[in-house]
Amino acid sequence: MKRLAKFAFSTFAMVGTIALGVSVAQADNWRYAMEEGLNDPQGLYATKFKEVIEANSDHTVQIYPVGSLGESADAMEQAQAGLLQFIDQSPGFTGALIPEAEAFLVPYVQPTDPEEVRTFFKEGVAVNEMFHEIYREQGLELLSVFPEGQQVVTTMEEFRSPEDLAGMKIRTMTSPLLLETYKAFGASPIAMPWGELIGALKTNMVDGQENPTIWIEAYGLDNLTKVMTYTGHAQYTTAVMANADFYDGLSDEDKKLVQDASQQALDYILDLAVELDEKGLAKIKETNPDYKIVRLTEEERAVFKERAKAVEKAFIERAGERGAAILEQMKKDMEAAKKM
C-alpha cells in the first residue's frame, strides 16, 4: 500500500505540472528517470544525452536520479503512463514486464573483451533490431542498451569450480533468473535489494555478491570480502527507453535529435565504462593490496558455461519462442564481434 500511495502522490504531482503547460508530446521540458546517481554510469549517460539535446534544440531535459520518483516499478509505471518521457532501467527490474529482456542476465551470451563488447552493443542484431518490437508492445521506444561493466563476484573464500561455491550464500538482484544462475553455479543465492547488501555482508547474512568493479570499489565491497573473481559470465546491462506515444508525437526533426543524442551518449558511455572499470580495479589494488584477484581460466570457465545451460532452459521457459530466438541471435552476435 505504501508503494501505491507513493506512486499516486508522484503521479498527481506530475499531472499537475503537465497540466500547467502544453501536451506531453509538445513539452519543452522532457523528464528522464534512472536507477542510479548522476555520477554513476546511468547518470553519466543521461547527462551526455541531456547535453546533446539542449545544445541542439530549445528543449530541456530534467533528470531524476534513483529514488526521486519512488522505486523502479513506480518510475516504469509513470513512463508507460506518459508522465515521464525517458527512463533508464536494467533487465533485472524490467524482466517482470518484458521477460525477453532477461536474456541479458543469461550467463555467457555476451563478450568480455572491450572491443568485442562495443561491437556487440553497437552492431548486434539482437540489441539493435529484435528488442525494439518487444519493448514497443509495452508502450516503450527502445533507444539504447549499454553495459556498465563486467560482472565480478566477490566472496570470503576463493572458488574455481561449482564445487567450491557449494554452500556459499551469494546475494543477487531480485530476479528469479539470477537465482537460477547461482543455483546452477553451485551456490546458495539470496535475492536482496541493493540497500540491504552492505549490512548483510557485515553480519555474514551473505558470503558474497556480484557487481561491476566500479561498484565494488565505490561502495567498499572489497573491504567486506576477501576475494574478487572474474568469471566472465555477464555484463551489467541497462536500457534507455522513451514513452512510445511521446516519441511518435515528435516531429521528424525531434525524433532525429533524440536518436542522435542517444547514439552520442552510447558512444560516450561505451568508452567510459571501460575506463571506469579499469580505474575501479586500480584503486582496489592500491587501497587493498592484500585483496586476492582471481581470473578463471578458459578450462575453469567451461565448467560454469556447461552449468549455464540450465539457466538458458529456465529463461526460454519464461520468455518462450521469442526469447529462444533472441538468445540464439545474441550468441551469433557475440561470435560475430569476436571476428571483427
Image (cartoon, rainbow, N blue to C red):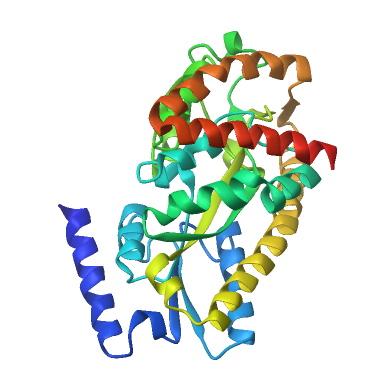
Residue 301 or residue 294, whichever sits in front: 301
Above or below, 55 relative to 299: below
Percent position of residue 311, x then y: 50, 22
Percent position of residue 59, x then y: 51, 86
Percent position of residue 168, x then y: 50, 18
Residue at 66 percent across and 13 percent down: it is: 303
Residue at 77 percent across and 38 percent down: it is: 336
Q: Taking the image as drawn, is residue 143 in sight?
A: yes
Residue at the outermost right position? 340
| Quadrant in the picture for residue 113 | top right
Residue at the outermost top position? 163
Residue 202 or residue 63, whichever sits in front: 63
Above or below, 303 relative to 194: above
Above or below, 122 relative to 184: below
Above or below, 253 relative to 49: below
Q: Taking the image as drawn, is residue 218 in sight?
A: no
**Residue 293 horizontal side relative to residue 340, left or right:** left
Picture quarter with the C terminus: top right
Residue at 68 percent across and 60 percent down: it is: 269
Q: What count of labels does the image hold? A: 0
Percent position of residue 73, x then y: 32, 53
| Quadrant in the picture for residue 232 | top right
**Residue 162 horizontal side relative to residue 282, left or right:** left
**Residue 44 horizontal side relative to residue 172, left or right:** right
Residue at 66 percent across and 32 percent down: it is: 331
| Quadrant in the picture for residue 11 | bottom left
Residue 309 or residue 5, whichever sits in front: 309
